[in-house]
Image (cartoon, rainbow, N blue to C red):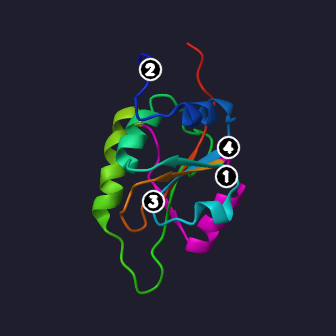
Amino acid sequence: MLKGISPLISPELLAVLCRMGHGDEIILADAHFPGDSYNPNVLRADGLGIPALLDGILPLFELDAYADDPLVMMAAVDGDTLDPAVEASYLVPIQIHAPQAPAISRIDRFDFYDRAMAAFAVVMTGETAKYGNIILKKGVTPVD
């Protein structure tokens, strides 16, 4: 265990976050997402919800300040509706750790899958919320 790093962040996830460069994307996927079908670099975080993972990741991870959409979620398909509580629960750690981040944008399901194929990694979580997937785009880590 390391000081200052959430115990929810596995050694594998910490290594992935470290290896990512600016502009790389990581997907925090809900438990229903077909991660292995879209990306060869899948990590497991079974049993963990995405809000808790965001709370552990965002203190370590700079969001891309040059991108219009460093936070992206899947839009509902025709006939479905989104539960606003899902995004609201994600905004709690985002507003704590990245208060200047732009609003979460939404993209079509198949555009999301295309982004998953190009992502640096997919983290399969225990999140059961429908449309619970979120993409984080990494920015440049500031030097103090």
Identity of the amino acid at label 1?
A: Ala
> Quarter of the image holding residue 14?
top right
Q: Position of residue 121 (x, y in %)?
A: 64, 48
- Of tags 1 and 2, the one toward the viewer is 2
Q: From mark 4 to mark 1, how far is it between C-alphas?
A: 7 Å
Dot 4 alpha-carbon crowd within 10 angstroms: few under 14, some 14 to 19, many 20 or more: some
Q: Is residue 52 above or below residue 7?
A: below
Q: Quadrant of residue 31?
A: bottom left
**SS at circle 2:** loop
Name the image quarter holding the C terminus: top right
Q: Which numbered disc, 2 or 4, marks the residue closer to the eye?
A: 2
Task: Confirm or deny contact between disc 4 and disc 1 (CB under 8 A).
Answer: yes
Answer with mark 4 or mark 1, whichever residue precedes in sequence.
4
Q: Amino acid at mark 4?
A: Asp
Find the magenta span and give its range: 100-120
Other residues around mark 3 within 10 Å, as few (<14) / some (14–19) / many (≥20): many
Residue ID for mark 1: 119
Q: Quadrant of residue 98?
A: top left
The numbered mark, 4 or 3, whose residue comes first in the sequence reads: 4
Q: Amino acid at mark 2?
A: Met
At 55% from the left and 30% from the top, the residue drawn is: 11
List the single residue furthest toward the left: 85
Going by the image, does 71 lie left or right of 116?
left
Farthest residue in the top direction?
A: 144
Mark 3: amino acid: Asp
Q: Nearer the viewer, residue 96 or 122?
A: 122
Q: What residue is disc 2 on?
A: 1
Residue 24, which numbered label? 4
Other residues around mark 2 within 10 Å, as few (<14) / some (14–19) / many (≥20): few
Q: Which mark is residue 30?
A: 3
Q: Earlier in the sequence, mark 3 or mark 1?
A: 3
